[in-house]
Image: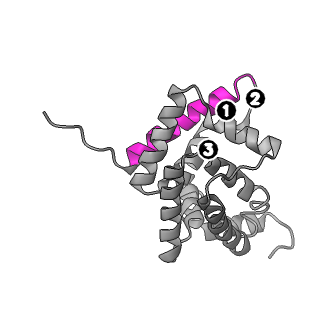
């Protein structure tokens, strides 16, 4: 008897996004939300968020989503509750480190592409902190390993995510998107 192959990153991300979509739909049941009107954008954003993570991190996160579903938990609803109540979120020592690195990457994008990422930093750190707080120590540790490894390799995972995002939406490179956004603002040239 042969065992089925271990799913690759693409299949892992696909299943993760499906669980996240189901949790999102449960969370907003009865309330109109923008993601209902644009489910493709929600899926694309979640795909690119997870696409830069290692297979180990993806497998760990997928396991958590599966366990949460079995236990009747909705991780997206829990994240929203933390955001709305302003409760302290971080429970793992790596969370503030991840948030600091990811926020620095986002700040680089905001500085380099100010018209594309206007206001992107306003709730970025808090939202990421709340999202990471829903994860087990094992998954947070793997996530930290991914982020730290990327930083040490000179990569900016936020840039990689958004380059993929705009490419998937057929909007062009970050430079092209910035030029289009800049052109919309009078006297910005």
Please tell me whether mark 3 sits on a helix, a strand or a loop: loop
Farthest right residue in view = 187
Q: Which residue is mark 2?
A: 32
Q: Give the number of the disc on residue 36.
A: 1
**Mark 3 or 1: the one toward you:** 3
Please tell me whether mark 1 sits on a helix, a strand or a loop: helix
Residue 27 seen anywhere in this rendered image of the structure: yes
In the displayed structure, 27 sits above or below 189; it is above
Q: Taking 71 as reference, is 34 left or right?
A: right
- Give the class, few, some or many, for how many residues have Cα within 10 Å of label 1's Cα (few <14, many ≥20): some
Q: Give the number of the disc on residue 134.
A: 3
Magenta-colored stretch includes residue 29: yes
Q: Residue at the spot x=49%, y=45% of the render?
A: 61
Task: Measure the C-alpha gap from mark 1 to mark 2.
Answer: 7 Å
Q: Do tag 1 and tag 2 residues touch (Cβ < 8 Å)? A: yes
In the displayed structure, 75 sits above or below 48; it is above
- Give the class, few, some or many, for how many residues have Cα within 10 Å of label 2's Cα (few <14, many ≥20): few
Q: Where does the C terminus fall, quadrant-wise? A: bottom right
Q: Where does the N terminus fall, quadrant-wise? A: top left
Q: Residue at the spot x=58%, y=58% of the render?
A: 166
Q: Which residues are magenta?
A: 10-30
Q: Taking 27 as reference, is 84 left or right?
A: right
Q: Main secondary structure of the magenta part?
A: helix
Residue placed most toward the observer, 59 or 38: 59
Residue 168 x, y percent position in the rendering: 53, 53
Task: Measure the C-alpha gap from mark 3 to mark 2.
Answer: 25 Å
Magenta-colored stretch includes residue 97: no
Residue 37 x, y percent position in the rendering: 68, 34
Q: Residue at the spot x=57%, y=35% of the render?
A: 21
Residue 172 seen anywhere in this rendered image of the structure: no
């Amino acid at each position: 008897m042969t065992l089925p192959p271990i799913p690759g990153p693409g299949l892992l991300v696909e299943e993760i996004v499906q669980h996240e979509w189901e949790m999102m739909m449960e969370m907003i049941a009865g309330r109109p939300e923008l993601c209902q009107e644009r489910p493709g954008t929600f899926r694309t954003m979640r795909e690119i968020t997870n696409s830069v993570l290692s297979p180990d991190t993806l497998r760990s996160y997928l396991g958590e989503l599966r366990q949460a579903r079995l236990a009747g938990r909705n991780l997206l609803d829990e994240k929203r509750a933390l955001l709305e109540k302003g409760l302290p979120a971080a429970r793992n020592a790596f969370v503030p480190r991840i948030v600091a690195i990811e926020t620095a990457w986002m700040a680089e994008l905001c500085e380099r592409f100010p018209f594309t990422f206007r206001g992107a930093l306003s709730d970025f750190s808090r939202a990421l902190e709340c999202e990471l707080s829903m994860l087990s120590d094992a998954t947070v540790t793997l996530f930290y390993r991914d982020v730290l490894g990327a930083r040490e390799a000179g990569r900016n995972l936020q840039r990689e995510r958004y380059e993929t995002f705009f490419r998937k939406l057929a909007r062009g490179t970050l430079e092209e998107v910035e030029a289009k956004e800049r052109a919309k603002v009078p006297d910005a040239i």
